[in-house]
Amino acid sequence: MRRLVRATAAGRAGYGLIVLGALLAMIPFAWEISTAFKTLGESVQAPPVLVPEHANWHNFTTVFENAPFARQFANTVVVSVGRVAGQLLLCSVAAYAFARLDFPGRHVLFGLFLSVLMVPSQLFIIPQYRIMQELGWLNTLQALILPGIFSAFGTFMLRQFFLGLPAELDEAAELDGCNPLQKYWLIYLPLARPGLIALGVLTLLWSWNDLLWPLVVNTDPQQMTLSAGLASLKGQYLTDFPVLMAGAVMATLPMIAVFALLQRHVVEGVATTGAKG
């Protein structure tokens, strides 16, 4: 009985910590929403104003006046979809090869492939910029898409998923006369749907919030994504924080909707990828 009481108390304490952590994580987002409806004076007032006296909806229209927000939103959608599609295709093919095909040096090559994860992404910026410059792709959307379609993490994630599938699938496919490409496309890819959805959502979130590379390679506001476009709203001497936060709220809402709709699949996919190492 005492053990049961202790376990119940520990469970309640654990849930309490989770709720507390969730509330703390929501504070920046709540402050962002509050600031989006403030006037400039209220946003810099000391002590801080928690709730604006009147909702200032003009901040949202000012975003469209100060930046090509609609164009940048469309750019972000195109870049994010392109990166997601590229990663799902290339990562799934590479993961299938590392997980199911037996070829010399497979484990060594996979180890070298994973070593990319230990290299800071900032080190690739100059080489990638030079490549885009030589191709004549500066200030283009393809310059944002191409470097983002390769992912060592995505390959590792899907490889773990493929390793968790039963080996009998290979034997049954071989008896039916399937070659490796047919096994990948007709059998393993459909079964990898949870892992693909999880990787797709994670890639979408990363691409939507990517800031450094879009700032470096695209300087034309018409070719910027939302993250770079919002960064350009910050002034050198004075920043209109309510307008900036209004743009941030509009840029954040699509990702909240996507994650709310697909969170069950994301959790299922991430949990399944750890089924077998």
Image (spheres, helix red, strand yellow):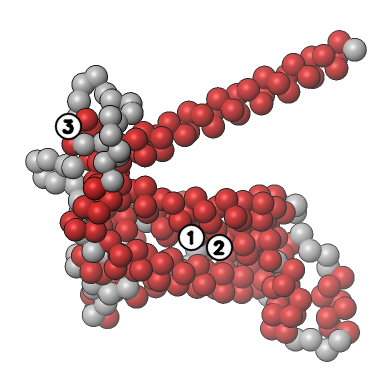
> Amino acid type of disc 2?
Gly
Check whether the beta carbons of the residues at disc 1 and disc 2 lie within 8 A of each other.
Answer: yes
Q: Position of residue 145 (x, y in %)?
A: 39, 71
Would residue 123 be seen by someone viewing this image from the given angle?
A: no
**Of tags 2 and 3, which is closer to the observer?**
3
Q: Position of residue 48 (x, y in %)?
A: 27, 23
Q: For the point 23% across and 73% down, which residue is it?
A: 138
Q: Which residue is mark 2?
A: 200
Q: From this viewpoint, which residue is outermost toward the front?
A: 54
Q: Position of residue 147 (x, y in %)?
A: 39, 68
> Amino acid type of disc 3?
Gly
**How far apart in space, not on screen, are marks 1 and 3 (Cα)?**
36 Å
For disc 2, the neighbor class at 10 Å (few under 14, some 14 to 19, many from 20) is: many
**How far apart in space, not on screen, are marks 2 and 3 (Cα)?**
41 Å
Q: For the point 53% across and 56% down, which residue is it?
A: 258
**Of tags 1 and 3, which is closer to the observer?**
3
Residue 41 marker: 3
